[in-house]
Amino acid sequence: MSIGAYRSSPIPSIYNLACTHPLDIRRFKITWNHELKLASTLPTLDFKPIFQMLPTLLQENNLDTSKILTITPTLASQWKNLIETNTELSIFKKDDTHPSIYKKEYFHIIQNTTSEKMYTDASKSQDGVGAAVIWNNSEFMYKLPSTCSVFTAESIAILKALDIITDHHLQDTIIFTDSLSAINNIKNTYNPSDIGLHFQNKIYTLQYHNNFKIKLFWIPGHSSIKENELADLAAKSAITSPLSTSTQIISSSDIRRLITKKFQQTWHQRWTSHYTKLNHIKHNTVNWTFPIEIHKKFEVIITRLRIGHTKISHSFLMVKEEPPMCTSCVHLYDVITPPNRLIRTEWVLLKNNAFASCVATSS
């Protein structure tokens, strides 16, 4: 085994130190992800699958299967990037750039433009998730599901700006956003996410069927740009404001995170119910890593001491003999026997050696 566990080690302990889920949990996770894939491609299927597990997870989080963003075939050619974007301001590193410089460059770029200007932003807190669009001195606020990531919320804010463009027949518009990742996702024509593909098809339809001109412009957040600051305040207010429009759009990537979190909790609950020697010193399923580069031999030693199964204490199981006795204390060989005895692993870290020695002492 790659972690170096002894052959008699309990399987749950091996799973824990290997930082992997048990097989049955992994099978369920694969099934749920497959149901999600089917749910997000329903419009392109000739049959309607019966979902058995996914609706339960969505109901627990006050979500609806019908609100999942559907994946449809791309309308534009993959080798042509037809979406106009401007990320000139991203060449300035935010940590080294004063807000006044951003503000000056921003005004320099837009000073001669006659396009309609929209500003989008999103916010996520313990109270929920909100998004907002600022246009023509008007605020459009949206309350999103609490499961949305900041990236999804920023993307939905841009999506709502496109809806406003459609409703008001705005022929020439610049959408300003402080989410560079959202713009890069929209520009990715070869492997877009579900929400990125949704953007591409919507912008393609507006540009080449309705003759609209749409440009995405990145501006840094919290850089004293008035309209962006207003969008930020509106997005924060949208979380609790009664004037917000409830929007139940769900991204597949957010649901995948829910599925991962669900099965991590399942595995944690199962682990805490076990009674192994490793449970005495490790009460969670978080990955235990070695703090430094050490030789494989010492990794094996430490792993076996953590699990409590070593060749000295458990080799008798392999040869079907009686367990060995310690001649000094007349007890069975054991690695951990709380609270009577405890063998401690001491790591001696030296300045010039990554790992000097691993010493076991008894107390």
Image (cartoon, helix red, strand yellow):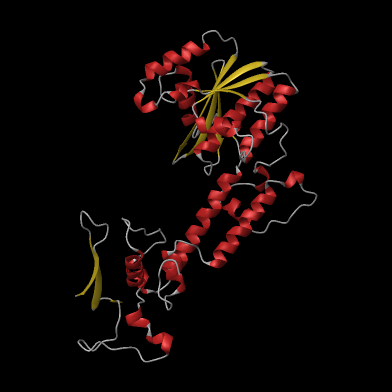
Q: Is residue 232 left or right of residue 302?
A: right
Q: Is residue 56 left or right of residue 22?
A: right
Asked if one can make out residue 244 in the rendered structure from this viewpoint, the answer is: no
Q: How many discs mark residues in the rendered view?
A: 0
Q: What is the quadrant of residue 97 in the picture?
A: top left
Residue at x 60% of width, y 46% of height: 63
Residue pushed farthest front?
352
Residue 280, how many percent across, how many down?
A: 33, 70
Residue 267, how many percent across, how many down?
A: 48, 63
Residue at x 28% of width, y 89% of height: 325
Residue pushed farthest top?
112
The C terminus - image quarter? bottom left
Residue at x 38% of width, y 83% of height: 315
- In the figure, 54 relative to 5: above or below? above
Residue at x 58% of width, y 59% of height: 29
Q: Is residue 177 left or right of residue 221?
A: right
Q: Nearer the viewer, residue 25 or 272?
A: 25
Residue 349, how many percent across, how many down?
A: 22, 59
Residue pushed farthest bottom?
322
Asked if one can make out residue 267 in the rendered structure from this viewpoint, the answer is: yes
- In the figure, 121 relative to 358: above or below? above
The N terminus - image quarter? bottom left
Residue 74, how many percent across, how many down?
A: 71, 36
- In the figure, 172 relative to 307: above or below? above
